[in-house]
Image (cartoon, helix red, strand yellow):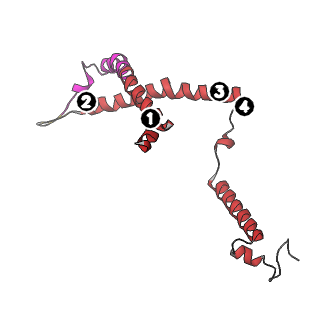
Amino acid sequence: MKGFREFIMRGNVIELAVAVIIGAAFTSIVNSLVDGIFNPIIAAIFNADEINKAVWQIGPVSLGVGAVLGAVINFVLIAAVVYFAIILPMNKLNEAMYVRKHGHTPDEEEAEVSETDLLTEIRDLLAARETGAAHAGTIETPAAAEASPSKPATGAHGA
């Protein structure tokens, strides 16, 4: 029971629950905006009562292209509303908070670290750890064996 309580009280579980609840509440706002404003405009442009009822007749077969077209349009409109009503303002707010905290805008170079840079940093950290371990005498690695007193050292630091 203690493990379950710790799991529930983790910050990310609570944040996820709040996100789901807010998302469900926001869905009705977005749907109302799309159904009440955008769909009537699109229906007026296509001169139809409802875009979802448009069909494409091929001989005896009726294809409900209006339903597919309506779903695609609804998806694009909902994505646009979410982007322009939530994502874009939050990005501007986060940038303004960063400027207030740090006194400058975040540089693109700070945000983007290349894979090569990360691998170089890992290599350097591993090399420093091997050098430290070789000097402490705790483990014997190929690099430590080369630097052992029984063999003459080579390279710029050699004798």
Instruction: Identify the residue under disc 2.
Output: 66
Q: Residue at x 64, y 42 (%)?
A: 111
Q: CA distance from mark 2 to mark 1?
A: 36 Å
At label 2, which amino acid type do we have? Gly
Instruction: Identify the residue under disc 1.
Output: 16
Front label number (1 vs 3): 1
Please tell me whether mark 2 sits on a helix, a strand or a loop. Answer: helix
Upstream in the sequence, badge 3 or badge 4? 3
Upstream in the sequence, badge 1 or badge 3? 1
Query: Looking at the image, which is closer to me, 147 or 113?
Result: 147
Instruction: Identify the residue under disc 3.
Output: 97
Q: Few, some or many C-alpha atoms within 10 Å of disc 2 (few <14, some 14-19, many ≥20)?
A: some
Q: Position of residue 61 (x, y in %)?
A: 13, 37
Upstream in the sequence, badge 4 or badge 1? 1
Upstream in the sequence, badge 4 or badge 2? 2
At label 4, which amino acid type do we have? His
Residue 102, disc: 4
Q: Position of residue 78 (x, y in %)?
A: 39, 27
Left or right of residue 98: residue 52: left
Please tell me whether mark 3 sits on a helix, a strand or a loop. Answer: helix
Upstream in the sequence, badge 2 or badge 1? 1
Please report the bounds of the magenta region as a residue range: 30-56
Query: Looking at the image, which is closer to me, 83 or 144?
Result: 144
Verify CB contact (< 8 Å) between mark 2 and mark 1.
no
Q: Position of residue 97 (x, y in %)?
A: 65, 27
Residue 44, disc: none
At label 1, which amino acid type do we have? Leu
Please tell me whether mark 4 sits on a helix, a strand or a loop. Answer: helix
Left or right of residue 65: residue 150: right
Query: Looking at the image, which is closer to me, 26 or 52?
Result: 26
